[in-house]
Amino acid sequence: MKKTVVMLGVFLALSLVYSGVAMAQEAGGGLSSDVKAMIALAAGLGIAIAAFGGALGQGKAAAAAIEGIARNPGAYQKVFTPMILGLALIESLVIYSLLISFLLVFKL
C-alpha cells in the first residue's frame, strides 16, 4: 500500500511540474521536443496501467470463477459463460487503451 501511495505521489508531482509544458504551443505550429516526450510518456504509461489493471481484473475474475466452480461443480455453465463474457469486456478495455496509445504516438 505504501509503495502505491509513493508511486502515485511521484506521478502527481511529475504531472504538476510538466503540466505547463504539455499545454504549451509553439507559434510555428510544430510540437516541441518536451511535448513530444510527454506524449510518448503518456502513451507508455497509459498502456502499462491498462495492461496491469486488465491482468489484475482477469486474474481476480478467473480465481473467483474457479473457486465458485470448485464449491459447486453443478453450476459450471452458470459461472463459466458470464466469466468468459467478463474477461472479453476487460480485454476490450485494454485494447481500447492500446488504440488511444497508438493515436497519441502517431500524433508525434
Image (cartoon, rainbow, N blue to C red):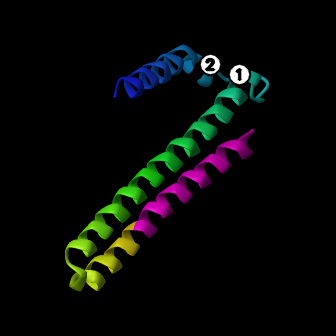
Instruction: Tell me the residue at 36%/23% (across/down).
Output: 2
Badges 2 and 1: C-beta atoms under 8 Å apart? yes
Q: Could you say which quadrant of the image residue 64 lies in?
A: bottom left
| Residue 71 versus residue 73 in the image, above or below | above
Q: Earlier in the sequence, mark 2 or mark 1?
A: 2
Q: Could you say which quadrant of the image residue 36 lies in?
A: top right
Quadrant location of the C terminus in the rendered image = top right
Q: Is residue 80 left or right of residue 38?
A: left
Mark 1 crowdedness (10 Å alpha carbons): few <14, some 14-19, many ≥20: few
Q: Between residue 99 and residue 94, name the one nearer to us.
A: 94
Q: Is residue 78 magenta?
A: no
Q: Is residue 76 left or right of residue 50?
A: left
> Which label is found at residue 21?
2
Question: Which secondary structure, mark 1?
Answer: helix
Q: Between residue 83 and residue 105, name the one nearer to us.
A: 83
Q: Which residues are magenta?
A: 87-108
| Mark 2 vs mark 1, CA separation in Å | 7 Å
Residue designated by label 1: 34
Instruction: Tell me the residue at 59%/50% (across/down).
Output: 100
| Residue 94 versus residue 10 in the image, above or below | below
